[in-house]
Structure formats: C-alpha cells, structure tokens
Amino acid sequence: MKSRALIIGTILSLVIAIMIPEVAAAKGGKPTKPEDPSAAGVLYGDLVVVERDGAGVPLLKDFTYVDGEHGEVTVACLQPLAYDCSLLFLWGDCIDSEDCDFDPEAHDACEVHVDDAEFLQEVSFGRGSVTRSQSFVIDSRYAEFLEVINDAEDLRMDPAGRVQMYIPTETVPVEWFWKTVDAPLENLGMYKAAMSYGCFHFVEKEMVGEEGVRVMQTFALDPSAIVLLRDTELGHLVCDYFDEPIDDTWDKEDCEPGPCWWEDPLNFNIPDRTADTYLPGDGVDMQDMNSATAFLAGATDKGDPMSLDEAITINTYIGINLWTLVGSKKDQYLEITYFPFATVGDEQFTYDRETSFPTGTTADLLTHELDENFRAFWDPAPLALFDEMAHQTYPLAHVDLDEVNLMVCRGGDAANVEVDDEVIVVNACDSTNETDCGGANWFAQATEHARKTVWYLHNWEVPELDN
C-alpha cells in the first residue's frame, strides 16, 4: 500500500528550502509549469485545511517509530485542523499515548485518527477552480485586459477595489460607458502580475499572422494607460522602465512600426523569475499586495468564502509560489518556496478595514420608495455600503463585513494550550495587530472582505436600464 506518511514526510525539505533561500532558489528558482501532466496528481490532489504559520507555510509534526522492515523511521506530517482551530488527532499521536496503539503495518502515522476523521475540513474552491487553468489561458485573458485598458479614457475602482475602465462601444455612433473588470480569468491574470512582478508587466501571446504563420505578439500598457494609472491609486502597478520618454508631445505613431519602448521586454526593469537568485515576493510591496486582494476576490467564486488554505493553494497553482516536482514515481511530492507576505525586511502584510472599505463608500443601488399616492416604485440612489447606520433604513444596502470574518488560527503550539491538564483551544487572531498571526492570514481576510463586496455588487447593483 502506498504510504502517505512517506510522501508527506518528505515535505520537510520544503521547510529547509524556506529557511535557506539559496537552496530554494537552486532547486526551484524556475517555476515548473502548472500544466506539467506529471505533477497534476500531486498538485491537484485532495486538499484539507492544515495548520500554517503566519506566512501560510504548513507546520509539520514529527513522529519517530520502529518499522519491522525499515527499522527506525521518522516522518514529518501535515497537521489538519478542525473548524475551531483545534489540532486533529493523528495515528502518529498514538505512538506515545496510553489511550491508543500505533501499528506501523496497519496505520499511516500521518493520517487522521478514525475518531477525528469526521472533523476534517476540505479546502473549498467552488467555481474558483478556474484558478487551475493552464498558464497560457490566464495569460491570454490578461492580454485582453491590457488591450482594453489601452483604449480607456478614464479609470477608477469600484467599492471592492476592482478596476473600472471608461471605454468606447463598438457601435455607431460611439458611446462611452464604465466597464468593470469582472471576468475571473482577467482578474486572475492581474493578480498573477501584481504578485509576481509588483506591476502590470508585458505578456507574450501566440497569434496567427499573415498566411497562417504563427507569431508571438507582445501586449503591454501603452503610455495612455500608464498616465491614467498614475492618476489613480493604482499608479504603483506601473512597471519601471529603463527608458520612458513620455512627455506632452508624445504620439503613438512616433515609434511606428515598432516595437515601441513600452512593449519591448528588454525595457522592463522587473524581477527575472527565471534567475536562480529569484525568490517569491521580489519586486512586490505592500501596495501591490493590497491591490492583489481585490483582483483575487474578483477571480474566485463570488458566493464561496475565501480561506487561507485556498489563497495559498492558488498561489501554488499559478506559480506565485515556486515549486518543483521531486521524488520517485511512487513517492513524488512538491518542493515549494512560498510567497513571504512581507515587504523589504521583516514588515509583514497588514490590513486595515476602514482604509480598504471606508464607511462613506457609496454605490448606486435600487431603493424601494413610495410616491405621493403610496404606490411603490424602485429608485436608484447612492447609498453607503459599509455604514451600519444605513442598514436601519435600507437593510439591503449594507455589506456586513463582520459576517465574513475568518477564523484565523494561530500557528504553532499556541493552537492547543494545556493548562492544569486541560487542553484549551486558542482560536485566535481577531486583530491585525496580532503580529504572530502573520501577513498571510490578513491577506486572506482582506480578500474575503473584497469577495463579499463583489458578491453584493453582483447581486444588488443598479442594472443599466433603457430610457
């Protein structure tokens, strides 16, 4: 029988990779493509909620026992969690226990004991499984976003933090309208860019040219989009260029036939993800991560709550976490270098709800009114989304973010604390000032609040009505 203990045990090397960046870079500096068929079983296998530290890295539990065939064996196991953050009992916990017996021939030390099996939590993705799409699919939709934003006349963000573009219709006469970037794959491409490079970088897409010849075409922000982004709160998502000759006399036709400076890959001063020295998080700062939470919220299932495990797994799926498939065919596993959720130095990602979702934020919503003859009608009005007082007058116009506060489990021994022979579960972190809870937890919380807001707008925003 194939032993999960041996597979999971080898994951200990990923912790070493995290602790020693040089080793991680040497073994996983160039991310393996998620569509690699040899890795599919390991990458997309069954997932359960496990104990993680503040960076989202799984915390492992070591067990040592004597096996009749192999002698002394040490395994490192993932630690699944119950809904209340308590640690589920593993068969390996029976090794030094008087309450149960461990038989290496019959039991897998890393499996949850039969008495606790019912408390396992599956990592839910819902329709967010779109994040498993192959990289060329995500890149293709990201290229479409770059094309549209280059035609935009103006930019803004909706209350959830998603990008809205003022663009022309394809009709005659041309009319202008606000388009929200709502498509999951486009948001996923934007998320991948922000978390991989800290900016909306170029992307190359294979196109069919003249006479059916397939050519690679580069898509990138043009100067008009660059200027628009810099005039909004999203200016930090403009990449650095070695040469940027934008001035008042600039014209797109000045660089024909191209390539123009803004679409030349060699002109982008961005991290080289293929370099052995590259590590996840290079080139990414706090602002980039804050914007990324809105993009991730737009990329996942609007009706399915976000969780820490889902966010970390998505990062692995799309290559933000670097991974390499290692081991034999029987016992293959992923060696992962995780995104650190920290800026330069030791400063971790923090989240302030009032800054991200100000009380005065409004959206045009349909309100139920009565005319002078007491006939009911619906009237669009700008209503505060996050103001609890507005809830008293218009119950449907209030997004209660407290309803979707995550259960943030502390990593490490603090999850279960023994006091006077009684185990007390410390559920945990209810403030971003709890630094030992880590940036990854607050990143997931910020994403979940944005996801709830996206869900609300999707269901209650005023539709476009004909005059």
Image (tube, rainbow, N blue to C red):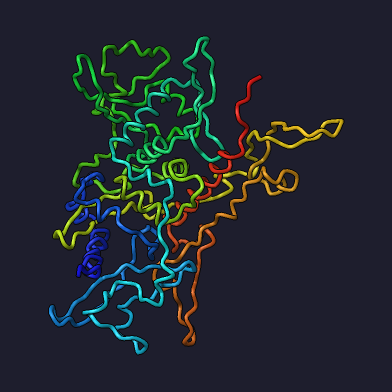
Towards the viewer: 53 or 44: 44
> In terms of image quadrants, where is residue 213?
top left
Residue 404 relative to residue 126: left or right: right
Residue 129 image offset from top left, x and y in percent: 38, 47
Tell me: residue 441, above or below residue 145.
below
Residue 67 vertical placement versus 36 (above, below): below
The percent position of residue 440, horizontal first and vertical second, equals 41, 55
* Front one among 132 and 236: 132
**Residue sitting nearer the eye, 55 or 159:** 159
Residue located at (49% from left, 74% from top): 425
Q: Is residue 92 left or right of residue 409?
A: left
Residue at screen point 49% across, 26% down: 165
Residue 439 picture location, percent across and down: 43, 55
- Please identify the quadrant where the N terminus is shown: bottom left
Residue name at image x 50 percent, y 34 percent:
233
Q: Position of residue 325 (x, y in %)?
A: 19, 54
- The single residue placed furthest to the right in the displayed view is 373
